[in-house]
Amino acid sequence: MSEHAVFHPFAGGISTDPHPTNLTVSGGATPSRTSEWLNTSGLTNFVVSYQLTGADASPDFTVTIDVSAQSAYELNNKTATTADYVALTVVSGATSGVFARKDATDLDDLQRPIRAMRVKVANNKADEVVTSFNVWIEGHPA
C-alpha cells in the first residue's frame, strides 16, 4: 500500500440508513449512529477528524472508535461484543461543532496497526438536535 487511505463513514448524518436523520434525544435515550466495520488492515498512524453541527451553537456529542484485531468482514457478519473490540474515546461531551482532529499525539493507540475499526457518534444533550455530522479516518501504510 503506497498511499494513505481515507474513510468517510459518516457524511451529513448518513450511516447505514439511506435517509439522513437527525440525532434527537427523546425519552431519555442517547441517540447514536454506528458505522459498519472498516478494513484498516495494513495501516497505522491514524487521524480521526470530525465536525458536527446542531440546532444551537453548543452541541454536546461524543465520538468513539471501536478497534479490533479481527477482520472487518468477520465483524460485519456477526454481532460483535465487547470481547471483540476495544472502545477508544476520540472526544466526549464536546461542546463545539468546529472541525477538529485527533491523531497519535492525542490518542496513543492511533499509532498502532488496527485491523478493523468502526465509528460511533452520540448526541448527549437532551434539548439539542445534532443535524449534521461528518467523520473521516485517515490511515498510513504500516
Image: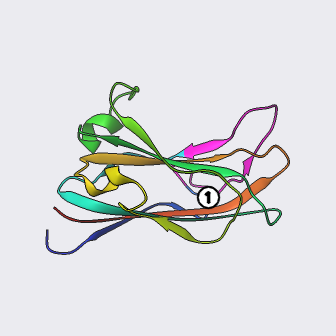
Q: Which residue lies furthest to the right in this view?
A: 127
Residue depicted at 68% across the width and 41% down the height: 31
Under mark 1, the amino acid is Gly
Q: Which percent across, then down, holds residue 55? A: 82, 62
Task: Looking at this view, name the residue that lies furthest to the bottom.
Answer: 3
Image coordinates of residue 89 in percent, x first then y, are: 49, 46
Disc 1 designates what residue? Answer: 13
108 inside magenta stretch:
no
Disc 1, SS: loop
Q: Which residue is drawn at 32% across and 34% down?
A: 77
- Which SS type dominates the magenta stretch? loop
Q: Is residue 137 left or right of residue 50?
A: left
Q: Where is residue 53 in the image (x, y as percent from the top left)?
A: 70, 65
Q: Give the range drawn in magenta.
A: 15-33
Q: Tell me which residue sits at (23%, 39%) in the image.
A: 69
Given residues 6 and 67, the one toward you in this image is 67
